[in-house]
Image (cartoon, helix red, strand yellow):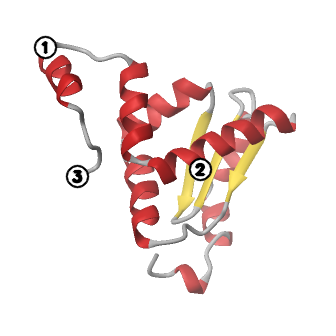
Amino acid sequence: MSLTVPANLLEQAQRGPISDDDFIECIQSSLPYAWSVMSGLATELREGGGRVAVDATEPPDEASWGQLFRLVGSDAMRGAVERHFGVRMAFQNCCKVGFFDPAATEEHAEFVTPRAQVLNQKPELINC
């Protein structure tokens, strides 16, 4: 299961759309490690003054790997996180996530190229 959905949020979704704020709260509580990566990237981007923030930290355990994969693998979660932080997100592999200022179109385009993907590969991460 990707998220632990509170009963009230499930009931709300059964009646109609839910707010990004409610969805973000669900992501935060369900995927605390993944959320810490996302919020850390947002802080780095905002406070660092740059246009790009990249986290390439290997998750500490299997549960953390799973959280990160679930968040970046869901279009709905990725979209909500991007809207929440006002960024574009990109994911290269098991532990390389980037946040991009919306104006950083060239940097984002380079991050998602096949060349960047190939250069990011490491033998120790072959089965991550």
The image position of residue 40, as x and y in percent, is 67, 44
Which element type, helix, strand or loop, lies under badge 1?
A: helix
Left or right: where 101 falls relative to 97: right
CB-based contact (under 8 Å), mark 1 and mark 3: no
Which element type, helix, strand or loop, lies under badge 3?
A: loop
Residue 90 sits above or below residue 84 on the image: below
Q: Residue at x 43, y 20 (%)?
A: 21
- The amino acid sitting under disc 1 is Arg
Label 1 Cα crowd, 10 Å radius (few <14 / some 14-19 / many 20+): few
- The amino acid sitting under disc 3 is Met
The image position of residue 4, as x and y in percent, is 26, 43
The image position of residue 73, as x and y in percent, is 39, 50
Q: Mark 1 or 3 closer to N-term?
A: 3
Label 3 Cα crowd, 10 Å radius (few <14 / some 14-19 / many 20+): few
- Residue occupied by mark 1: 15
- The amino acid sitting under disc 2 is Val
Q: Which mark is residue 1?
A: 3
Between marks 2 and 1, how big is the CA–CA gap?
A: 32 Å
